[in-house]
Every structure is written in C-alpha cells, then in structure tokens.
Image (spheres, helix red, strand yellow):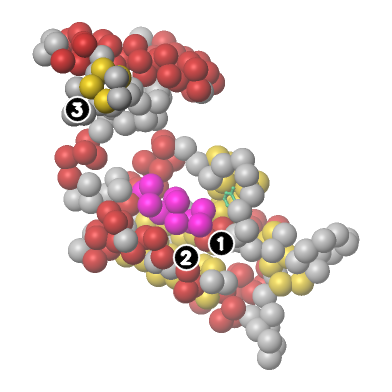
C-alpha cells in the first residue's frame, strides 16, 4: 500500500489538512498510510539538540547530519526503495508528471526542513532529493510535504472515482484547463457561451481546446511552448 513516511520536528502538524476532505476519507478507508516521525527523538543530549550554527558563519541554524541520519536509519529498512525527498525551496520544482511518478511508486519518504537548511552531507549520504513546490519560501517543509502528498493521494486507485480519469485536467495534457460553466444560463447579465449549449460535441471539444490554448498562452506561455514541442516529438 502507498505509504508516506514523514520526518519532521513538528509531527503534530500531521495529518492536519490531510485528515480532511478527499485525502482524509481515503486515509480512513485504508487506501493509503501516513506516519510522521519526530526527528528530535534522535536529538543530542538532555535538550535533544537537532541543529547547530552554520560552519563558516552566517544567520540561522543548520540541521545536523548525524541527527537526521540517525532518525532515518531508526525507521527505514535498508532496502526501502521509495523515493527519498527533502522539501526545500532550493529543490527541483514539483510537476504533475513527477506527482504521477510518485503516486505510481510504493510511496514516499519525505524530510521536512526547518532552520536555514540541512547539513549537505546527510543529503548526499542518504541519497535525498530536494523538491520545491514553488518559488517562494515557507517557514518549513511541512506544508510543502502536505501539498506533495495531497497531489499524489488523489491519483491513487479508488481515491477519486470517475473525476480522476481527468485527462482534461490542468497539466495532464500540458495545458491549463478550459473555463467551466453551469446553471443558471444568465448570471448578472453574463451568458454561458452559446457553443456549450449547442449539443454539438465536436464543436464543444474544439472550443474547449482553443480556450485551453488561449488561457495557457496568456498565463503560462512557457508551458505552451513545451506542450507544442512535445506534440511535435510525438509525430
Ligand atoms: N520549504 C520552504 N519553502 C519551500 C518550498 N517553496 N518548497 C518546498 N519546501 C519548502
């Protein structure tokens, strides 16, 4: 079963929002598992220290390599082949393609950073891969880990039902999604586009495709360029 193993200084933050809504329901139904491990359990001395000042000087504190390694080693089997991720604004940006890959693996191991950073040596020594959820800085990796887990869980078999098939969904075809409408037909003087009421499915399909292209061009031109490239490669 797909299982997320989270290493954090704030295990009480979990499941947090993952305990509600779609992911929470699936967790209750036993479709996936979540464990949050307190890195401080392996902390050093009476105060269970997990961090120290940056060697070479500078602001903030750095998570110790020995403490984090001990925390991982205390929980994980040597042959655990799940991807080992560290949430960090310095990481490779998370994409829907990566999320699909992670949902297809046996689960994920996620280290949540706090402080200024994590001693580089434990990242190398335990084969951790840094992943970012966007170009902004959170106060820790916990929320980022939840974002990643939520994105994976909704793709697991049985979690979403029919909607999950959604190849129309944003990013699934490299484009942002087309606009949606429902009743009433007129809202504050704004009408639903006539084509959607025509019953002509080919026309509707074409309109949606054109709208997806227009919106992607407007908001994310770099995505459109990539989608066009991929299409060309397929041919
Ligand atoms: N930790 C702090 N900021 C982050 C970000 N943008 N992505 C992932 N982890 C983070």
Left or right of 52 on screen, residue 151: left
Q: Name the residue under label 2.
A: 6
Kindly indicate whether the residue at mark 1 contacts the one at mark 3 (C-beta within 8 angstroms): no
Is the Cβ of the residue at disc 1 closer than 8 Å to that at disc 2? yes
Q: How far apart are marks 1 and 2 (CA)?
A: 7 Å
Task: Report whether the residue tagged 1 is closer than 8 Å to ligand 1.
Answer: yes
The residues bearing labels 3 and 1 have C-alpha atoms spaced at a distance of 45 Å
Task: Give the labeled residue for mark 1.
Answer: 112
Residue 61 image point, x, y percent: 75, 66
In the rendered image, the residue lying farthest to the bottom is 46
Residue 149 position by quadrant? bottom left
Mark 3 — residue?
184
Asked if residue 85 shows in the view, the reply is: no
- Mark 3 vs 1, N-terminal side: 1
Q: Which of marks 3 and 2 is nearer the N terminus?
A: 2
Quick one: 77 or 30, which is closer to the camera? 30
Return the residue nearer the eye: 173 or 181. Answer: 181
Image point 85% across, 59% down: which residue? 58
Task: Give the left or right position of residue 164, taking residue 67 as reference.
Answer: left
Q: Does the magenta stretch include residue 39?
A: no
Q: Which of marks 3 and 2 is in front?
A: 3
**Eyeballing the image, is 34 above or below 191?**
below
Residue at far right of view:
56
Depicted 95 relative to depicted 80: above or below: above
Farthest residue toward the left?
199
Q: What stretch is highlighted in magenta?
A: 143-152
Quadrant of the frame with the N terminus? bottom left
Q: Tell me the crowding category of disc 2: few under 14, some 14 to 19, or many 20 or more residues within 10 angstroms, Cα based.
A: many
Give the crowd class for mark 1: few <14, some 14-19, many >=20 residues within 10 Å. Answer: many
Q: In the rendering, at what x and y percent does residue 148 appear?
A: 44, 50
Cα distance in 3D space between marks 3 and 2: 45 Å
């Amino acid at each position: 079963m797909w299982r997320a193993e989270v290493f954090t200084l704030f295990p009480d933050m979990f499941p947090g929002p993952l305990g509600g809504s779609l992911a929470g329901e699936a967790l209750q139904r036993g479709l996936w598992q979540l464990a949050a491990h307190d890195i401080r359990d392996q902390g050093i001395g009476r105060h269970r220290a997990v961090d120290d000042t940056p060697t070479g000087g500078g602001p903030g504190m750095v998570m110790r390599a020995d403490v984090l390694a001990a925390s991982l080693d205390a929980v994980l089997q040597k042959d655990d082949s799940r991807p080992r991720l560290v949430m960090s604004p310095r990481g490779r940006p998370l994409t829907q393609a990566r999320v699909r890959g992670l949902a297809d693996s046996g689960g994920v191991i996620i280290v949540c950073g706090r402080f200024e950073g994590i001693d580089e040596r434990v990242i190398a020594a335990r084969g951790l891969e840094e992943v970012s959820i966007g170009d902004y800085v959170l106060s820790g990796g916990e929320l980022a880990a939840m974002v990643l887990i939520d994105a994976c869980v909704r793709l697991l078999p049985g979690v979403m039902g029919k909607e999950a098939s959604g190849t129309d969904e944003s990013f699934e075809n490299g484009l942002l999604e087309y606009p949606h409408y429902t009743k009433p037909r007129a809202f504050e003087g704004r009408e639903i586009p006539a084509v959607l009421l025509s019953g002509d499915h080919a026309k509707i399909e074409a309109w949606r495709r054109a709208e997806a292209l227009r919106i992607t061009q407007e908001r994310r031109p770099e995505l459109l360029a990539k989608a066009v490239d991929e299409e060309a490669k397929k041919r």
